[in-house]
Amino acid sequence: MMRRMILVAPLIVFAAMAIFFLVTLESTRVTGPQSPLIGKPAPGLLLDGVAGSGAPGLSSADIQGKVVIVNVFASWCTPCRIEHPLLIELARAHLVVGINYKDKPDAARAFLDELGNPYARIGADGDGRAGIDWGITGVPETYVVDAQGIVVWKIGGPLTPDIVSAELLPLLARLSGN
């Protein structure tokens, strides 16, 4: 009997520790992307277009008074490729602008030539300065700015069909009064 207890005791301790850690992780998990920009005016923008692409640059004036999706992307970003078809689809009904983050102009042009350009305007943020102002932690990131210029939503990571249908489209409908 004692021998069996010695064999079972470590399993009981391990199970108790696993339950404790799972409960602790679950209770401290951050739900949804957090951004200090939510509820605040969108940071200023004054970015040239991607060199040689013919795409117009991006400034704060370009998004004033409009509900706009601001997508931060780069050609070297694999998740950006994954979300790109969703951006193409969104651009059919909504204003989508892009910030090309720390990218080479030739690579950005090739990316857009290959996958299509969903962006009404693209600002080239070669040095990452706009990224700092927007609090970019990685690419892709997508924001929604309302018609008053307030950042109302952010997702860090690629857009997915579930995120678009469950969160983004209902938000855009509400903001546009539909």
Image: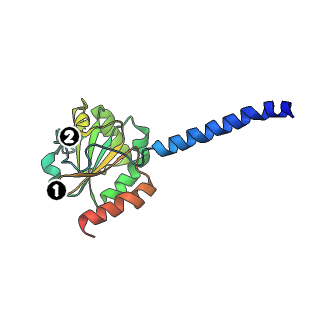
**Residue indicated by mark 1:** 148
Disc 1 from disc 2: Cα separation? 24 Å
**Residue 13: x percent and y percent?**
68, 34
Whether residue 93 is visible here, answered yes or no, is: no
In the figure, residue 47 lies in which quadrant? Answer: top left
* Helix, strand or loop status at disc 2: loop
**Residue 175: x percent and y percent?**
25, 63
Residue 98 is marked as none
Q: Nearer the viewer, residue 99 or 115?
A: 99
On-image quarter of the C terminus? bottom left
- Name the mark nearer the viewer: 1 or 2: 1
Residue at 27 percent across and 43 percent down: it is 36
On-image quarter of the N terminus? top right
Residue at 24 percent across and 44 percent down: it is 122
Query: Neighbour class for label 2 at 10 Å: few (<14), some, many (≥20)?
Result: many
In the figure, residue 103 lies in which quadrant? Answer: top left
Residue at 31 percent across and 42 percent down: it is 72
Query: Neighbour class for label 1 at 10 Å: few (<14), some, many (≥20)?
Result: few
In the figure, residue 124 lies in which quadrant? Answer: top left
Extreme-bottom residue of the structure:
178
Which amino acid type is marked by label 1?
Answer: Gln
Residue 86 horizontal side relative to residue 96, left or right: right
**Residue 125: x percent and y percent?**
24, 35
Query: With respect to residue 94, does 28 lie above or below?
Result: above
**Residue indicated by mark 2:** 49
Q: Nearer the viewer, residue 155 or 121?
A: 155
**Disc 1 + disc 2, Cβ < 8 Å:** no
Whether residue 48 is visible here, answered yes or no, is: yes
